Image (cartoon, rainbow, N blue to C red):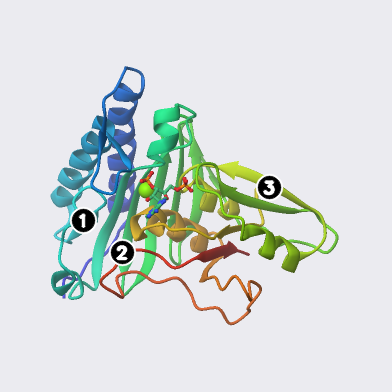
Amino acid sequence: MTSFDLTPELAEKVKQIAVQAGKKIMEIYDKDFTIYDKSDSSPLTDADLAAHHHIVDGLKAISPLPILSEESADIPWSTRKTWVRYWLVDPLDGTKEFIKKNGEFTVNIALIEYGVPTFGVVHAPAIDKTYVGQEDVGAYSEVNGTQSPIKAKKHTVGETWKIVGSRSHQSSEINKILDALGGENELVAMGSSLKLCLVASGEAHMYPRVGPTCEWDTGAAHAVAIAAGAKVTVLDVENPMDADASPLRYNQKDSVLNPYFLVSC
Ligand SMILES: Nc1ncnc2c1ncn2[C@@H]1O[C@H](COP(=O)(O)O)[C@@H](OP(=O)(O)O)[C@H]1O
Ligand SMILES: [Mg+2]
Protein backbone atom coordinates (compact mmCIF):
# COMPACT_ATOMS: atom_id res chain seq x y z
CA MET A 1 0.00 0.00 0.00
CA THR A 2 1.32 3.48 -0.85
CA SER A 3 1.08 5.72 2.21
CA PHE A 4 0.38 9.38 1.55
CA ASP A 5 -0.14 12.40 3.76
CA LEU A 6 -2.05 15.23 2.09
CA THR A 7 -0.45 18.18 3.87
CA PRO A 8 -1.87 21.72 3.46
CA GLU A 9 1.05 22.47 1.10
CA LEU A 10 0.22 19.48 -1.10
CA ALA A 11 -3.49 20.33 -1.04
CA GLU A 12 -2.60 23.83 -2.25
CA LYS A 13 -0.44 22.34 -5.04
CA VAL A 14 -3.32 20.15 -6.20
CA LYS A 15 -5.58 23.20 -6.26
CA GLN A 16 -3.01 25.06 -8.36
CA ILE A 17 -2.80 22.12 -10.79
CA ALA A 18 -6.59 22.36 -11.26
CA VAL A 19 -6.46 26.15 -11.71
CA GLN A 20 -3.65 25.89 -14.28
CA ALA A 21 -5.57 23.18 -16.15
CA GLY A 22 -8.49 25.62 -16.18
CA LYS A 23 -6.25 28.24 -17.83
CA LYS A 24 -5.38 25.75 -20.58
CA ILE A 25 -9.08 25.03 -21.07
CA MET A 26 -9.88 28.75 -21.34
CA GLU A 27 -7.24 29.27 -24.05
CA ILE A 28 -9.23 26.83 -26.18
CA TYR A 29 -12.68 28.01 -25.00
CA ASP A 30 -11.98 31.47 -26.33
CA LYS A 31 -11.18 30.14 -29.83
CA ASP A 32 -12.99 27.94 -32.38
CA PHE A 33 -12.31 24.37 -31.28
CA THR A 34 -12.54 20.94 -32.88
CA ILE A 35 -15.07 18.45 -31.48
CA TYR A 36 -14.03 14.79 -31.82
CA ASP A 37 -16.24 11.80 -31.12
CA LYS A 38 -15.16 9.51 -28.30
CA SER A 39 -16.08 5.82 -28.58
CA ASP A 40 -19.20 6.44 -26.44
CA SER A 41 -20.01 9.35 -28.82
CA SER A 42 -19.75 11.99 -26.09
CA PRO A 43 -17.96 15.09 -27.32
CA LEU A 44 -14.25 15.50 -26.73
CA THR A 45 -12.33 18.64 -27.42
CA ASP A 46 -8.69 19.60 -27.37
CA ALA A 47 -9.45 21.27 -24.05
CA ASP A 48 -10.22 17.92 -22.35
CA LEU A 49 -6.88 16.56 -23.53
CA ALA A 50 -4.82 19.66 -22.67
CA ALA A 51 -6.27 19.67 -19.13
CA HIS A 52 -5.80 15.90 -18.80
CA HIS A 53 -2.10 16.03 -19.67
CA HIS A 54 -1.47 19.00 -17.41
CA ILE A 55 -3.17 17.33 -14.44
CA VAL A 56 -1.57 13.92 -14.89
CA ASP A 57 1.93 15.43 -15.21
CA GLY A 58 1.30 17.68 -12.19
CA LEU A 59 0.00 14.90 -9.94
CA LYS A 60 2.83 12.55 -10.94
CA ALA A 61 5.31 15.26 -9.92
CA ILE A 62 3.89 15.56 -6.40
CA SER A 63 2.87 12.02 -5.46
CA PRO A 64 3.45 8.37 -6.33
CA LEU A 65 -0.28 7.54 -6.31
CA PRO A 66 -2.01 5.97 -9.32
CA ILE A 67 -4.32 8.17 -11.38
CA LEU A 68 -7.67 7.36 -12.99
CA SER A 69 -8.67 10.10 -15.42
CA GLU A 70 -11.67 10.11 -17.74
CA GLU A 71 -9.23 10.54 -20.61
CA SER A 72 -7.05 7.55 -19.64
CA ALA A 73 -9.58 5.23 -18.06
CA ASP A 74 -8.57 2.00 -19.81
CA ILE A 75 -6.93 0.59 -16.68
CA PRO A 76 -8.18 -2.97 -16.04
CA TRP A 77 -10.18 -3.76 -12.91
CA SER A 78 -7.56 -6.38 -11.97
CA THR A 79 -5.16 -3.42 -11.46
CA ARG A 80 -7.63 -0.88 -10.07
CA LYS A 81 -8.98 -3.22 -7.43
CA THR A 82 -5.54 -3.26 -5.77
CA TRP A 83 -5.67 0.54 -5.28
CA VAL A 84 -6.52 1.72 -1.78
CA ARG A 85 -5.60 5.33 -2.53
CA TYR A 86 -5.60 7.07 -5.91
CA TRP A 87 -6.33 10.32 -7.75
CA LEU A 88 -9.64 10.38 -9.60
CA VAL A 89 -9.77 13.05 -12.31
CA ASP A 90 -12.28 14.51 -14.70
CA PRO A 91 -10.21 17.09 -16.60
CA LEU A 92 -13.30 18.73 -18.09
CA ASP A 93 -16.69 17.82 -16.68
CA GLY A 94 -19.61 19.28 -18.55
CA THR A 95 -18.16 18.98 -22.04
CA LYS A 96 -21.60 19.73 -23.47
CA GLU A 97 -21.74 22.98 -21.46
CA PHE A 98 -18.23 23.82 -22.69
CA ILE A 99 -19.33 23.32 -26.29
CA LYS A 100 -22.49 25.39 -25.65
CA LYS A 101 -20.22 28.04 -24.11
CA ASN A 102 -22.43 28.60 -21.06
CA GLY A 103 -19.55 28.50 -18.56
CA GLU A 104 -20.93 25.59 -16.47
CA PHE A 105 -17.97 23.23 -16.73
CA THR A 106 -15.33 22.18 -14.24
CA VAL A 107 -11.90 20.66 -13.64
CA ASN A 108 -12.14 17.90 -11.03
CA ILE A 109 -9.42 16.24 -8.95
CA ALA A 110 -10.32 13.90 -6.06
CA LEU A 111 -8.25 11.84 -3.66
CA ILE A 112 -10.02 8.53 -3.03
CA GLU A 113 -8.97 6.51 0.00
CA TYR A 114 -10.54 3.13 0.74
CA GLY A 115 -13.44 4.00 -1.58
CA VAL A 116 -14.14 7.35 0.10
CA PRO A 117 -13.42 10.80 -1.43
CA THR A 118 -11.31 12.45 1.29
CA PHE A 119 -10.18 15.50 -0.67
CA GLY A 120 -11.47 17.27 -3.75
CA VAL A 121 -10.92 20.34 -5.89
CA VAL A 122 -13.58 21.54 -8.31
CA HIS A 123 -12.49 24.51 -10.42
CA ALA A 124 -14.87 26.33 -12.77
CA PRO A 125 -12.50 28.37 -14.95
CA ALA A 126 -15.11 30.37 -16.90
CA ILE A 127 -16.57 31.81 -13.68
CA ASP A 128 -13.20 31.69 -11.91
CA LYS A 129 -14.60 29.88 -8.89
CA THR A 130 -12.94 27.03 -7.01
CA TYR A 131 -14.35 24.67 -4.38
CA VAL A 132 -12.07 22.67 -2.08
CA GLY A 133 -13.06 20.13 0.56
CA GLN A 134 -11.04 17.87 2.80
CA GLU A 135 -12.15 15.30 5.36
CA ASP A 136 -11.64 16.50 8.96
CA VAL A 137 -10.57 19.95 7.68
CA GLY A 138 -13.64 21.52 6.04
CA ALA A 139 -14.69 23.10 2.78
CA TYR A 140 -14.37 26.50 1.18
CA SER A 141 -15.04 28.29 -2.05
CA GLU A 142 -12.54 30.71 -3.55
CA VAL A 143 -13.22 33.65 -5.84
CA ASN A 144 -10.51 36.15 -6.85
CA GLY A 145 -8.16 34.74 -4.21
CA THR A 146 -10.69 35.21 -1.39
CA GLN A 147 -11.63 32.03 0.46
CA SER A 148 -14.97 31.65 2.23
CA PRO A 149 -15.96 28.60 4.29
CA ILE A 150 -19.02 26.78 2.91
CA LYS A 151 -21.64 24.71 4.68
CA ALA A 152 -24.55 22.66 3.39
CA LYS A 153 -27.98 23.88 4.55
CA LYS A 154 -30.81 21.76 5.92
CA HIS A 155 -34.29 22.28 4.55
CA THR A 156 -36.61 23.77 7.15
CA VAL A 157 -40.34 23.03 7.44
CA GLY A 158 -42.41 25.19 5.09
CA GLU A 159 -39.40 26.36 3.08
CA THR A 160 -39.46 25.93 -0.72
CA TRP A 161 -37.25 22.99 -1.67
CA LYS A 162 -34.43 24.14 -3.91
CA ILE A 163 -33.51 21.18 -6.12
CA VAL A 164 -30.63 21.10 -8.60
CA GLY A 165 -30.80 19.09 -11.81
CA SER A 166 -28.74 18.56 -14.93
CA ARG A 167 -29.02 21.16 -17.66
CA SER A 168 -28.22 18.66 -20.42
CA HIS A 169 -29.36 15.26 -19.04
CA GLN A 170 -32.87 15.31 -17.56
CA SER A 171 -35.04 12.47 -16.28
CA SER A 172 -38.80 12.30 -15.79
CA GLU A 173 -38.26 10.16 -12.66
CA ILE A 174 -37.34 13.34 -10.83
CA ASN A 175 -41.09 13.86 -10.37
CA LYS A 176 -41.29 10.83 -8.04
CA ILE A 177 -38.76 12.52 -5.78
CA LEU A 178 -40.60 15.86 -5.86
CA ASP A 179 -43.83 14.02 -4.94
CA ALA A 180 -42.08 12.32 -2.01
CA LEU A 181 -40.78 15.68 -0.74
CA GLY A 182 -44.15 17.44 -0.96
CA GLY A 183 -44.56 21.19 -0.56
CA GLU A 184 -43.27 23.86 -2.92
CA ASN A 185 -40.15 23.32 -4.93
CA GLU A 186 -37.91 25.30 -7.22
CA LEU A 187 -35.75 23.53 -9.82
CA VAL A 188 -32.36 24.94 -10.69
CA ALA A 189 -30.62 23.67 -13.86
CA MET A 190 -26.85 23.46 -13.79
CA GLY A 191 -24.15 21.65 -15.76
CA SER A 192 -21.31 19.51 -14.43
CA SER A 193 -20.16 18.83 -10.86
CA LEU A 194 -21.22 22.38 -9.92
CA LYS A 195 -24.54 20.75 -8.97
CA LEU A 196 -23.00 19.00 -5.97
CA CYS A 197 -21.18 22.23 -5.08
CA LEU A 198 -24.49 24.12 -4.94
CA VAL A 199 -25.67 21.72 -2.21
CA ALA A 200 -22.27 21.94 -0.47
CA SER A 201 -22.49 25.73 -0.36
CA GLY A 202 -26.08 25.78 0.93
CA GLU A 203 -27.44 27.34 -2.29
CA ALA A 204 -29.62 24.26 -2.89
CA HIS A 205 -31.08 21.65 -0.55
CA MET A 206 -30.78 18.64 -2.78
CA TYR A 207 -29.38 17.16 -5.99
CA PRO A 208 -31.02 13.88 -7.00
CA ARG A 209 -29.20 12.27 -9.94
CA VAL A 210 -31.54 9.90 -11.73
CA GLY A 211 -29.33 9.19 -14.72
CA PRO A 212 -25.88 7.88 -15.56
CA THR A 213 -22.66 9.43 -14.33
CA CYS A 214 -19.17 8.02 -14.00
CA GLU A 215 -17.09 8.02 -10.84
CA TRP A 216 -14.83 10.81 -12.13
CA ASP A 217 -17.89 13.07 -12.63
CA THR A 218 -18.62 13.06 -8.90
CA GLY A 219 -15.48 12.21 -6.85
CA ALA A 220 -14.08 15.73 -6.33
CA ALA A 221 -17.40 17.49 -5.72
CA HIS A 222 -18.45 14.58 -3.49
CA ALA A 223 -15.40 15.30 -1.29
CA VAL A 224 -16.39 19.00 -1.18
CA ALA A 225 -20.00 18.11 -0.33
CA ILE A 226 -19.20 15.80 2.58
CA ALA A 227 -16.54 18.15 3.95
CA ALA A 228 -19.28 20.84 3.93
CA GLY A 229 -21.65 18.61 5.91
CA ALA A 230 -23.77 17.14 3.09
CA LYS A 231 -24.42 13.45 2.40
CA VAL A 232 -24.05 11.65 -0.93
CA THR A 233 -26.04 8.42 -0.85
CA VAL A 234 -27.23 5.75 -3.25
CA LEU A 235 -30.72 6.70 -4.44
CA ASP A 236 -33.65 4.30 -4.69
CA VAL A 237 -36.22 6.22 -6.74
CA GLU A 238 -39.05 4.17 -5.16
CA ASN A 239 -37.84 5.15 -1.66
CA PRO A 240 -36.01 8.45 -2.15
CA MET A 241 -36.12 9.56 1.50
CA ASP A 242 -34.58 6.33 2.83
CA ALA A 243 -32.69 7.40 5.95
CA ASP A 244 -30.58 4.22 5.79
CA ALA A 245 -29.37 4.71 2.21
CA SER A 246 -25.72 3.75 1.91
CA PRO A 247 -23.00 6.28 1.05
CA LEU A 248 -21.87 6.40 -2.58
CA ARG A 249 -18.48 4.66 -2.80
CA TYR A 250 -15.71 4.45 -5.38
CA ASN A 251 -13.59 1.71 -6.93
CA GLN A 252 -15.76 -1.10 -5.62
CA LYS A 253 -16.48 -2.78 -8.95
CA ASP A 254 -15.30 -3.25 -12.52
CA SER A 255 -17.71 -0.65 -13.97
CA VAL A 256 -16.94 3.01 -13.30
CA LEU A 257 -20.64 3.92 -13.63
CA ASN A 258 -22.23 5.35 -10.48
CA PRO A 259 -25.64 4.19 -9.30
CA TYR A 260 -28.32 6.90 -9.08
CA PHE A 261 -27.46 9.07 -6.09
CA LEU A 262 -28.78 11.82 -3.87
CA VAL A 263 -26.83 14.78 -2.50
CA SER A 264 -28.63 16.21 0.51
CA CYS A 265 -28.09 17.68 3.94
N1 LIG B 1 -25.12 7.88 -20.82
C1 LIG B 1 -24.14 8.27 -20.00
N2 LIG B 1 -23.22 7.38 -19.54
C2 LIG B 1 -22.24 7.76 -18.71
N3 LIG B 1 -22.09 9.03 -18.25
C3 LIG B 1 -22.97 9.95 -18.68
C4 LIG B 1 -24.04 9.64 -19.57
N4 LIG B 1 -24.72 10.77 -19.80
C5 LIG B 1 -24.10 11.75 -19.10
N5 LIG B 1 -23.07 11.25 -18.41
C6 LIG B 1 -22.12 11.95 -17.58
O1 LIG B 1 -22.73 13.13 -17.06
C7 LIG B 1 -21.77 14.17 -17.12
C8 LIG B 1 -22.43 15.50 -17.34
O2 LIG B 1 -23.46 15.64 -16.44
P1 LIG B 1 -24.44 16.89 -16.48
O3 LIG B 1 -25.21 16.82 -17.75
O4 LIG B 1 -25.26 16.68 -15.28
O5 LIG B 1 -23.58 18.09 -16.40
C9 LIG B 1 -20.88 13.85 -18.30
O6 LIG B 1 -19.58 14.31 -18.00
P2 LIG B 1 -18.58 14.87 -19.15
O7 LIG B 1 -19.14 16.15 -19.63
O8 LIG B 1 -17.30 15.03 -18.40
O9 LIG B 1 -18.53 13.80 -20.20
C10 LIG B 1 -20.94 12.33 -18.39
O10 LIG B 1 -19.80 11.71 -17.83
MG1 LIG C 1 -17.62 14.37 -16.57
Circles 2 and 1: CB distance less than 8 Å? Answer: yes
- Res 8 visible: no
Residue at 50%, 45% (x, y): give it.
Answer: 194
Q: Give the structural element (helix, strand or loop) at label 2.
A: loop
Q: Which residue is mark 3?
A: 187
- Which of pointers 2 and 3 lies earlier in the amino acid sequence? 3
The disc labelled 3 sits on which kind of residue? Leu
Residue at 34%, 72% (x, y): give it.
Answer: 115
Q: Residues within 10 Å of mark 2 (few under 14, many from 20)?
A: some
- Which of pointers 3 and 1 lies earlier in the amino acid sequence? 1
Q: Furthest residue to the top?
A: 31
* Quadrant in which residue 73 is drawn: bottom left
Image: 103 above or below 262: above
**In-front residue for pair 214/54:** 214
Q: Residues within 10 Å of mark 1 (few under 14, many from 20)?
A: few
Q: Give the structural element (helix, strand or loop) at label 1.
A: loop
The x and y percentages for residue 39 are 23, 47
Q: Which mark is residue 256?
A: 2
Q: Is residue 216 found left or right of 254 in the rendered image?
A: right
Circles 3 and 1: CB distance less than 8 Å? Answer: no
The x and y percentages for residue 173 are 61, 61
The disc labelled 2 sits on which kind of residue? Val
Q: Which residue is mark 1?
A: 73
The disc labelled 1 sits on which kind of residue? Ala
Q: Give the structural element (helix, strand or loop) at label 3.
A: strand
Q: CA distance from mark 2 to mark 1?
A: 9 Å
Image: 252 above or below 225: below
Q: Is mark 3 within 8 Å of ligand 1?
A: no
Residue at 59%, 70% (x, y): give it.
Answer: 237
**In-front residue for pair 51/42:** 42
Quadrant, the C terminus: bottom right
The x and y percentages for residue 58 are 19, 44
